[in-house]
Image (spheres, helix red, strand yellow):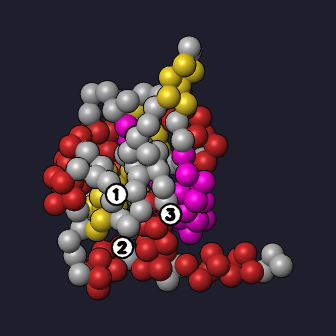
Amino acid sequence: MLTPDALNSKLAQIKLLLTDVDGVMTDGSVYIGGEAEIKRFHIQDGLGLHFLQRTGIRVGWISRRPSQATQRRAQELKIDFLAQDPVGKMPAARRILAEAGLRFDQVCYVGDDLVDLALLNAAGVSVAVANAVPEVKQMAHYITQATGGNGAIRELSELILKAQNKWDVIVESFVAEL
């Protein structure tokens, strides 16, 4: 864990937020009935990602579990990068970074389980959701108050935007609508 000042300093350098999907963007539940798979995504998490994108921070999802539900939600939110590769998350992250022209120290990665450890170790800022496994929490620079799929990404989005002095611009844009 980082001190609040050290965390703020690192978050100020973030240009790309990468997250796991199941257990971070969702609560980890998968409902399967007949041919359909259903996942629950938190609306405030989606809005938090939108806020990041509005201020020039790119967003990507990396999952080892391909899912049409994930694909659909990523399309709805206009996620910049989506990798659903059962082989591994690190090769997907390297491809995304090459395409974006960024380095790992410019990335904040959010995870919840053992399959996220390599990316958490590589990222400039590593974040665990509140309900992550102990090994992930131990590696994290920050642990969210909210659990995965229940506002953790919104919480982190606000922290990043505040560290980059962009939060007030977001708030003012909604006040201006009045």
User: Nearer the N terminus, badge 2 or badge 1?
Assistant: 2
Q: Is residue 59 above or below residue 171?
A: above
Residues at marks 2 and 1, CA–CA distance in whole angstroms: 16 Å
Q: Residues within 10 Å of mark 2 (few under 14, many from 20)?
A: many
Q: Quadrant of the C terminus?
A: bottom right
Residue 62 located within the stretch drawn in magenta: yes
| Residues tagged 2 and 1 counted as in contact (Cβ below 8 A) | no
Residue 129, numbered label: 1
Residue 77 shows which numbered tag?
none
**Where residue 7 appears, x then y in whole percent?**
29, 77
For badge 1, the amino acid type reads Val
Where, by quadrant of the figure, is residue 142 drawn? bottom left
Q: Which residue is mark 2?
A: 11
The three-letter amino acid code for the residue at tag 3 is: Arg
Q: Amino acid at mark 2?
A: Leu
For the residues bearing labels 3 and 2, Cβ distance under 8 angstroms: no
Q: Earlier in the sequence, mark 3 or mark 2?
A: 2
Instruction: Say what secondary structure mark 3 lies in.
Output: helix
Tag 3 residue: 154
